């Protein structure tokens, strides 16, 4: 092999590896965005669950009933 062929093959290899790295980086970013959206959704669900649980505590329920009858 002469030098020109080796340089051409190495250039092609580097170009393919660069494209592969860019594609992998895009895939990782897409996965991170999806995980972030899932985490945000789970956080909202947990906040709603915590709020519902707070309303279902006996003290809160009895307090609201008593407040209703006092009026």
Image (cartoon, grey):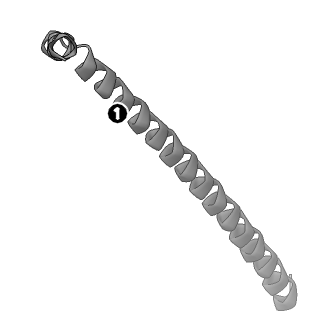
The residue at 65%/60% (across/down) is: 26
Q: Secondary structure at mark 1?
A: helix
The residue at 20%/10% (across/down) is: 65
Pick the front one: 8 or 43:
43
Tag 1 residue: 47
Pick the front one: 20 or 42:
42
Pick the front one: 9 or 42:
42
Quarter of image, res 28 = bottom right
The residue at 34%/33% (across/down) is: 47
Pick the front one: 60 or 3:
60
Q: Position of residue 70 (x, y in %)?
A: 14, 14
The residue at 26%/13% (across/down) is: 56
Q: Residue lying furthest front in this view? A: 71
Left or right, 30 with respect to 51, comes to right
Q: Residue lying furthest bottom in this view? A: 4
Q: Quadrant of the N terminus?
A: bottom right
Q: Quadrant of the C terminus?
A: top left
Quarter of image, res 60 = top left
């Amino acid at each position: 092999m002469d030098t020109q062929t080796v340089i051409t093959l190495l250039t092609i290899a580097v170009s393919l590896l660069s494209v592969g790295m860019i594609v992998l980086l895009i895939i990782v970013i897409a996965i991170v965005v999806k995980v972030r959206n899932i985490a945000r959704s789970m956080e909202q669900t947990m906040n709603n669950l915590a709020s519902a649980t707070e309303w279902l505590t006996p003290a809160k329920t009895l307090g609201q009933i008593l407040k209703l009858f006092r009026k």
